[in-house]
Image (tube, grey):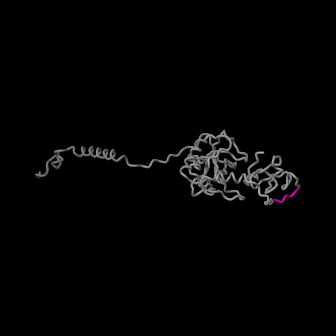
Amino acid sequence: MGSDELQWCGQPRDADTMIYPNISRRLGGVGALLVLGVILMRGWPVVAAPEQRGAPPTGSTSAFVTQVVDGDTIRVRIGTTNETVRLIGIDTPEVVDPRKPVQCYGREASARTKALLDQQTVYLQADNTQGDRDRYGRLLRYVWSANGVDTNLLLISDGYAFEYTYALPYRAQSAYKAAQTSARNAQRGLWSPSTCAGVVAATKTRTATKSPTPTRTTTTTPVGPVSAASAPCRIGQIKGNRTSMIYHLPSGAYYAKTKLNVQCFDAERAAVIAGYRRSAR
């Protein structure tokens, strides 16, 4: 046996190892303590949390988005039925009416809704405070993405839509109003001074209430009998006021008075598709 080796259980060992036979095990414990100390001083390593995917609300209906009409209106297929859906609680700038200029941030709002929903499976949720359909026959719904995101709320939060209460408060009104306040304070989207500065709603009001221009006349040439009340449309046709974008039924209070800048329709559905809304009287 050499002078620099000693016999330990029949195997040559280093002298220090022989003196401290448990050193490897002890170092293992010390190493763990050192690692723990580093963690306590510096914190655990940052690891990205897995994406949290929500679930569609209970009682919602699955649908497939076939077309995005504009920022607040979509067309969907529910089973074998095609429907038009108006998103509850929001209003976006106009973009599809051929007789009116595209409103500020209208294209951006439409593009955002299209990016979020077009050709996607969504979940439609009704609100019993609002009725099932609006006066144009469109379904009134909250639209949830497949991963549980309230698209209506998201459009307001990101500054693509205004909060909109039609008549009665809707279930999510307080949350939507808070989202609008946040977007306005942060000057996001249509609230930015470099875009609309939040004045699109005022523009809509001025457009809807301005007086008719007498020099503009209808481009519709009626074919068939015309009465004093129905002029310039045929008897029984619906009159659409191109200035206010309101249509009047023959039984309406303002039907006979509507004579200038008129578009004639054979059915209410045609007027709605053209972008008109029904007169309240």
Examine the structure image and report whether residue 112 is included in the region drawn in magenta.
no
State the image quarter where residue 217 is shown.
bottom right
Which quadrant, please, contains the C terminus?
top right
Examine the structure image and report whether residue 221 is included in the region drawn in magenta.
yes
Relative horizontal placement of residue 170, taking residue 39 as reference (left or right): right
| Image location (x, y in percent) of residue 7 | 14, 47
Magenta part of the protein: which range? Answer: 220-224
Relative horizontal placement of residue 136, taking residue 64 as reference (left or right): right
| Image location (x, y in percent) of residue 177 | 59, 44
The residue nearer to you, when weighing 80 against 18, is 80
Most distant residue in the left direction: 3
Most distant residue in the top direction: 128
| Image location (x, y in percent) of residue 60 | 62, 42
**Majority SS type along the magenta span:** loop
- Count of marks, rendered view: 0
State the image quarter where residue 167 is shown.
top right
Relative horizontal placement of residue 43, taking residue 137 as reference (left or right): left
Relative horizontal placement of residue 225, taking residue 22 as reference (left or right): right
Please name the residue shown 31% across and 44% down the image. Answer: 36
The residue nearer to you, when weighing 69 against 15, is 69
